[in-house]
Image: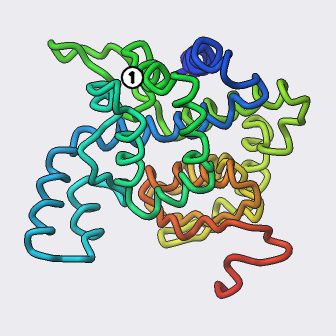
Amino acid sequence: MNHTQHKAIVNFIWSIADDVLRDVYTRGKYRDIILPFTVLRRLDAILEPSKDKVLEMHQKLNEMKIDNQAPQLSRTSGYVFYNTSNYTFKKLLNEPSNIRQNLEVYLDGFSINVQDIISKFKLRNQLETLEEGDITFALIEKFCSSDINVSPEPTTDKDGNTVLDGLSNLGMGYVFEELIRKFNEENNEEAGEHFTPREIIQLMTHLIFEPVKGKIKDGTYLIYDPACGSGGMLTEAEHFAKQINPKATFHLYGQEVNPETYAICKADMLIKDEDPEKIAYGSTLSKDGFSNIQ
């Protein structure tokens, strides 16, 4: 997916804000809704193909009275996260009159690692405002549009032809960073407070890895960013390092003090099947989240 397609997705998501949120939220508050719903829609699209199998497994484990269901449910979903509610974004649209209640059930159905993301976004605090503005249905409906694809997998027609390309983790990073930039412009904030532009990150990865690329042999390496923002540096560093040696394994660690960008980064790591506990929340200077790692 090229830069033009990334921009098209950003413009579509921004249009959701203008079309749905305008009379309920000020433009400076659009990010409080758009960013978490974009994350949730991506997670939702990823989990949708395995949804029925996860529900079957969840019911089976309940009948067997197994409390620790996370390993089996993760294995069934194919990712380190899952959702045990009966809902997806699209199924939430089937009951417009109960969409607030069903959305809460849907949020509660996510695995504990996603609950942390939802909490950091403070999304549940927004549900009453969405309901009072009577925009919950319209918001979810827009995110379910066939004109946008935030899943890593392409969408296809009935004949199997690709309609919309999938959105890679690198591409999703571009989308989030462009959205954050637009939101910051509305609030007269500096984009650099939240992320480093990809062009700068790419230069930094070259400066870091080029001098040592001959030393990156087969094996396992740790990549750490003490102020990881939305995770762009970690993603780009891993991408560049794997080009140097595709046989090497890289584990990503990061810490971020801003709850919003921490949530975005953690969601990205979940999708990449990285251990979500390797992304710590808080200030690296005042409380190192990885002081036990030598």
Q: Is residue 32 left or right of residue 186?
A: left
Q: Nearer the viewer, residue 49 or 210?
A: 49
Q: Nearer the viewer, residue 174 or 243?
A: 174
Percent across and percent down for residue 121 are: 62, 49
Percent across and percent down for residue 62 are: 15, 68
Residue 240 visible somewhere in the drawing: no
Q: Residue at x 41, y 20 (%)?
A: 141
Q: Residue at x 65, y 14 (%)?
A: 18
Q: Residue at x 54, y 60 (%)?
A: 116
Q: Is residue 229 left or right of residue 115?
A: right
In the image, residue 38 sits, relative to residue 280, either above or below, namely above
In the image, residue 167 sits, relative to residue 247, either above or below, namely above
Where the C terminus falls, by quadrant? bottom right
Q: Residue at x 28, y 49 (%)?
A: 85
Percent across and percent down for residue 79 are: 33, 55
Picture quadrant where residue 102 is located? top left
Residue 2 visible somewhere in the drawing: yes
Residue matched to label 1: 144
Give, as a three-letter code, the residue at label 1. Answer: Cys
Q: Nearer the viewer, residue 290 or 249?
A: 290
In the image, residue 26 sits, relative to residue 118, either above or below, namely above
